[in-house]
Every structure is written in C-alpha cells, then in structure tokens.
C-alpha cells in the first residue's frame, strides 16, 4: 500500500493559472490511488485549475470508471493492493477502446528501473512522491498539449485524406472528360478519313472516266500472260509435288540413300525435271509478272484486297521477289547482267500484310530493273563501277521501325519527276510499257495501310534510292 503524501495546495502563478483554467474546461482526469488523502489533495489541485476530476481507490474500480466515463488522462499510482498500476496499465494498453488514454504514473519509488518499467508498460510520464503541485500541473498540462497536437494532427490527416478523395474524384472526372474528348477526336478523325476517302474515290472516278482506252489495253495485255499460266500451271504443280516428295523421302531416310529413294528418283526422272523446270518457270514468270503488275496493282489501288496481319521475315519476302524477277536480271543484247548486292541487317519479325509488302518489293525492284534497261555491256575495267547494280540494304530505323533501302545506279530522275513519282497513273515509260500504278499502290500500302514511310531520293545521272520504313508492331487490322 502506498503511503500518504503531503501536497501544498497551491496552483500556478496567476497568468499560468488562468491559462490552465481556460484550457482545462471539459477535460476529464481520473486519479487512481489507494490512499484517500492523496486522492483528495490531487483532486483539489486539479479541480481548482478547471479540470473535471474522477477518483478511484483501486485498480479494478479504476478500470470500471475508465470503461464507463473514458477520461482524457489517468494519474495512476504504482503500488496498490489488488492490481498494481503496472497491471492496470497493461490491461488498458491491451484494450482497443482504452489504449489511447495517456497514463502518468505516481510513485514513491525513485529507482531508475521503476521509471523504465513504467515507460515500458506504456506510461507517458512518471511523477515521484512527494510531488509538488506545480510539477503535477505542468506535467498534466504538457500531456494535454501533446493530446491537442495529436488531435490537430489527426484532423490534418483527415483533412488530407478528404482532400485526397476530392483530388481523386477530380482526377476521375478529368480522365472521363479526356476519354470523352479522345472519343470525339477519334470520331472526328474517322469522319475526316471518310471524307478524304470519298474525295479520293471521286477523284479516281473522274480519272477513270478518261482511261477507257487504257483499260481496254490492260484487258488485252492480261489475256496473253494468262495463257502462259494456264498452259503450264499443272505441269509446274506436278513437278513441285514430286520434288517435295523427294525432299520428304530423303529427310526420312537420311543419311543413307535407300532403295526407296532410288525408286522415287527413277520414277520421276529427276534429271528431266531439273532441265525442264527452269524453262517452265521462265515462261510462267513472264506471264505471272504481267498479271501481278496489272491485276494486283488495280486491286490494291482500289483497296479491294483485305488480308490478315502477321509477323514475317522481310528478308524472305525480298528473296522471294528476287527469285520471281530473276530472269529479268540476266544479261540481254542491251545490257550486261544486273548485279544484286544485299546488305541485310538484323531485323526482328515485322507485323504486316506480307502479300502487300511483297508487292511493294516487286514494284520497286521491278522499277529499278527497268531503270537499268538502257545499260550497255561494260567496255573496260575502268567502268566496273558502272555495272548495272541494285543494292538492297535493311537496317533498324529506331526501336520501333525497320528500314529497307533499294537503290540502283541507273540514270536517275529529275526533281520534277520525283515530285510526281507516287501519283496514280504517273509514268515515264513509253505508252503500253507501264500502268503508272506500281509506286502509287506501293505508297498506299506502306503509308496508308501500314502507317509507314516511303521516300525517294535521286540524283540525275547517278541513280535512285527508295526507302521503305515500317513499324515493327504493325497496325490494327481493319474491321
């Protein structure tokens, strides 16, 4: 049991007293001490300064009072018979509803270990007996000042939370407004695109009205190449099937030449196929090239060909195009053989319409071949650099695009011609030699269909270079 303590019943100075009295209104303090004299004297000191005082003479009564009245501050004696102050404090701090109430311990024990234990148990201060009224009031005032600051902090935090909620709402409203603006912008772009498409269709219709004779000529040109194709297609298909069968059989029976492979070789007459296939291909390619140039050009110019997008190796498309045009690279009576110089960079697979991009390669390489048609055979070693040559270079444009550059050392074109090179039906070739649609369709495929770039650079007398730039990830397919 704690011993009674003599307390001088005086408050602070007049100025401080008035401050405390004003600040103490409505603040409840619970004093817990098993000695009535201590309770009476502490109650008198605190009540005179304006505090609302409650008293308890045991730990259990203190807990009951706390649960019933929830004081703002507790002055708790350490040594009591039923529950010690430490035990009471431990119970308080374990209770979610009471743990926030600050506890100032009162004790005659002055050892450091007792003070340390008081703070470990959750106390906010420690007053030793016999205590002075001024000390008690100052420590109480400081605790209420801390409580006030904590309350202000909580209010500020709540204000910040509320403001954050308001800001989030404003952000959502702004995002919704931006989304609405984007939607309207997309609608506007779609409307503009529709208008441009309609204008292009009107311009095309107007031009086509004066091209009736050209269409008739194209129809006539289609007839002869079609005869080449239909006359030789079945044979080519049969040969290809046989070759595939040989390859498949060889793969299955590799590495030794089995009787089965010998039987297949004898049956299909491989030597005959090797001898006849190039001739057959030559006649077919003459016709197919004409058909592709005319029919596919017209179809793509009118945008009737819609295909799916997929990731492809552009080098394979270039090589396939060169194989198709291989016969046009050979020497003839007007020029020496055209050399192909390939400088392939490391390109990722590009998402695109492979058939359309191959058409672009066909048109551009075909034009380069035509540009070299007037070359004559090289006369001396000093003119080696003037061999008819086509350079094909591929490289990364940036992290999102790839570039394909196709150049020739032909005669080049003037700036006036370069400005019109992508216009529909524009051609510098003799009448009947070109439709004027190849580069126009190529521009439409690269720029409009794939959102890429197609540029032409040329120096008259030196040659021409066309640069294709395509996005690696491609564009969304049309619906």
Image (cartoon, grey):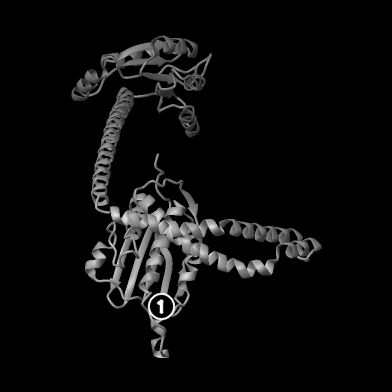
Residue placed most toward the observer, 54 or 209: 209
Q: Quadrant of the C terminus?
A: top left
Residue 291 falls in which quadrant of the image?
bottom left
Residue 78 placement (x, y as % from top left): 47, 21
Q: Is residue 249 above or below residue 390?
A: above
Residue placed most toward the observer, 120 or 157: 157
Is any part of residue 453 visible from this angle? yes
Q: Which residue is mark 1?
A: 388
Is any part of residue 402 visible from this angle? no
User: What residue is drawn where x is 56% and y is 57%?
Assistant: 233
Spot the residue most to the right.
Answer: 259
User: What residue is drawn where x is 45% and y is 18%?
Assistant: 3
Residue 120 placement (x, y as % from top left): 48, 30
Q: Is residue 463 above or below residue 240?
A: below
Q: Is residue 170 above or below residue 338?
A: above
Residue placed most toward the observer, 371 or 478: 371
Residue 470 placement (x, y as % from top left): 39, 56
| SS of the residue under disc 1 | loop
């Amino acid at each position: 049991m704690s011993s009674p303590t003599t307390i001088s019943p005086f408050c602070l100075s007049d100025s401080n007293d008035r401050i405390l009295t004003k600040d103490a209104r409505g603040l409840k303090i619970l004093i817990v001490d098993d000695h009535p004299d201590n309770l009476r004297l502490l109650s008198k000191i605190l009540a005179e300064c304006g505090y609302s005082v409650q008293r308890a003479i045991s730990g259990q009564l203190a807990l009951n009072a706390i649960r019933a009245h929830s004081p703002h501050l507790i002055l708790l004696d350490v040594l009591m018979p039923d529950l010690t102050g430490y035990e009471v404090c431990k119970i308080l701090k374990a209770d979610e509803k009471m743990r926030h109430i600050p506890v100032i311990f009162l004790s005659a024990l002055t050892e450091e270990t007792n003070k340390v234990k008081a703070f470990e148990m959750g106390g906010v201060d420690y007053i030793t007996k016999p205590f002075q009224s001024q000390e008690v009031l100052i420590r109480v005032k400081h605790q209420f000042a801390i409580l006030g600051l904590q309350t202000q902090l909580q209010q500020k935090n709540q204000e910040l939370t509320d403001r954050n909620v308001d800001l989030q709402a404003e952000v959502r409203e702004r995002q919704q407004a931006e989304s609405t603006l984007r939607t309207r912008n997309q609608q506007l772009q779609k409307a503009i695109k529709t208008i441009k498409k309609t204008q292009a269709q009107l311009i095309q219709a107007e031009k086509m009205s004066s091209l009736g004779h050209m269409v008739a000529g194209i129809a006539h040109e289609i007839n002869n190449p079609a005869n080449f194709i239909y006359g030789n297609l079945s044979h080519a298909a049969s040969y290809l099937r046989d070759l595939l069968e040989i390859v498949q059989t060889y793969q299955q029976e590799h590495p030794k030449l089995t009787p089965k492979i010998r039987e297949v070789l004898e049956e299909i007459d491989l030597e005959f196929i090797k001898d006849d296939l190039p001739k057959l291909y030559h006649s077919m390619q003459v016709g197919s090239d004409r058909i592709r140039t005319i029919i596919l050009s017209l179809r793509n110019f009118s945008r009737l060909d819609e295909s799916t997008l997929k990731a492809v190796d552009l080098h394979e498309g270039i090589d396939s195009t060169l194989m198709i045009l291989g016969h046009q690279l050979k020497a003839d009576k007007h020029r020496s053989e055209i050399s192909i110089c390939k400088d392939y960079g490391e390109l990722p697979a590009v998402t695109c319409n492979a058939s359309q991009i191959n058409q672009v390669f066909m048109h551009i390489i075909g034009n380069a071949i035509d540009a070299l048609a007037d070359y004559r055979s090289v006369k001396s070693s000093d003119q080696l650099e003037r061999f008819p040559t086509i350079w094909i270079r591929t490289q990364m444009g940036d992290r999102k695009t790839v570039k394909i550059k196709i150049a020739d050392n032909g005669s080049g074109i003037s700036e006036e011609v370069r400005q019109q090179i992508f216009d529909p039906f524009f051609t510098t070739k003799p009448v009947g030699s070109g439709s004027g649609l190849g580069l126009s369709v190529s521009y439409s495929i690269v720029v409009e269909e794939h959102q890429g770039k197609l540029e032409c650079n040329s120096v008259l007398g030196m040659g021409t270079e066309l640069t294709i730039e395509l996005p690696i990830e491609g564009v969304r397919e049309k619906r």
